[in-house]
Image (cartoon, rainbow, N blue to C red):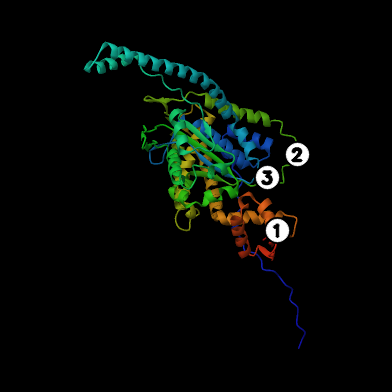
Amino acid sequence: MSALELIPFEPIRPDPLVRPSAKGEPYPLACLPPILVFGVEGIVSKVQCPVGLAANSVVAAAALVSQAHVNVPGLGGAVGPCSLFVITVAQSGERKTSADNLAMKPIKEWERERVKEAKEADDTYRRAALAYDEASKAAVSKAKSKEGGNGAREAIAKALEGVGDPPKTPIRPNLICDEPTPEGLWLLLSDGLGIAGIFSAEAGAFVGGHAMSTDNRLKSAALFSQMWDAEPLRRVRVSGISSPLYGRRVSMHLMGQPEAMAGFISDPTLRDQGLLARFLWAVPESTMGTRFQRNVAADAGAKLSRYQRAIMRCLERPIVRADDDERACAPRGLSLSETAQTVICAFADDIERELAPGGAFATITGLAAKLAEQALRLAGVFTFVSDPEASMIDESTMRNACQLALWHGGEALRLFNAGSASVEVMSAEVLRIWLIEQAETEVLQSRMLTHGPNRLRDSKSLSAALKLLQEGHWVTKTQERPATWRVWREAI
């Protein structure tokens, strides 16, 4: 008999927790009109953030300033808004806030100036309201003293008619909010400019905030979907029935980390209600590890200034109002050139084919079915910011908008296919990455609790994440007291 041959020990290779995401296509920057390209290039040069991240900020800002002025034609003949809902998923450290601040700078400056002016209007209104109240009281008192019995009522009504109408409340100039409640957003659209932007570079606060709490999630999702559709907003409460809000427009840009957005993406309530399908999604490739110190391009400031001036010009254009509501927008309709109409119809048909079983978009049919409408909205925004006087969407703009909408569809496809994991699995993945980054071979569980990821700094959540990692052979418990764990460090 031959001697036994020794077989080297090989530990069990871990099972993947999250399906690896396919590599995305580069952002099609050439699809944007030149004025928005200037903005993206200026931001990227100054901040060194991913192109897609800067582009989403610029496009969302452009939608915010366009939505009050133009509507776009629909495929079925209906007219729709050019408002956009955009989501950018990017890791902490990708400079989301810095990029968004540059893209939104003209809007924030415009809002700040209008708020200053509104303080004077508020003072004037308060004085006028006080004078009206006092005049009304005096008129009523005088009418009562002159007329008694049944004649008093008619005399009081006539006296109040002589006082005139009460002063109108000034229009609130607030334009941007980052974590609105449904009630607060209603108030903003009711008393404000008739347009609003929900913009947050830290969308975790929005996703985990009051509007998206368990009790309010469905109500908020339905309201946001109505706003995307530009439907009249109606509210009925025990305290009374509010008049419907017509002609309101809302755009949105949420920027969040993958772990913060995981629950949002996988939420069945938001998926089934249709809110997730109304977003343009993007997961830009990271630039971290390549952002070395260098001189900013000489023309970066000039490009950024050109973009910011264009956005400011759009903001300063008077909003056309409805005859019966000084806060309701009455956007003019853009038309499609004959060739642009051919382009969007062919694009819609191409998307429709891919919705069938086995098609490219068969797993995200709700979202993909809206890509043609998204393309029309993008084309409307591009047309307006390029030429605020334009009345028609041309073929070139329509082709570019279709290509960009298709890119966003591809981003959504790889995000939803790879990111459909539950919040618990995503938490375990966050812990795994944190453990691999530690210098120690073995890590105390107590250290994970005090110094590990913020979301896992309670015993229940940490234990659940460790259990998932153990089941997947990512960690091994090497000691019971104190509890100590070893993590598999070899990459898959």
Disc 2 crowd rating (10 Å Cα; few below 14, some 14-19, many 20+) is few
- Residue 311 on image: x %, y %: 56, 29
- Residue 223 on image: x %, y %: 43, 40
Marks 3/1 in contact by CB < 8 Å: the verdict is: no
- The residue carrying mark 3 is 287
- The residue carrying mark 2 is 293
Closer-to-camera residue (419/62): 419
The mark tally for this picture is 3
Q: Reading the chain from its start, which is encountered first: label 2 or label 1?
A: 2
Q: Amino acid at mark 3?
A: Thr
- Residue 353 on image: x %, y %: 45, 52
- Residue 364 on image: x %, y %: 48, 52
Using residue 294 as the reference point, say whether residue 426 is left or right of it.
left
Quadrant position of residue 35: top right
Disc 3 crowd rating (10 Å Cα; few below 14, some 14-19, many 20+) is some
**Image quadrant for the N terminus?**
bottom right
Closer-to-camera residue (200/319): 200
**Which type of secondary structure does the marked residue at label 2 adopt?**
loop
Closer-to-camera residue (83/353): 83
Point out which mark residue 311 bears: none
- The residue carrying mark 1 is 444
Instruction: Using the image, determine if residue 246 lies above or below residue 152.
Output: below
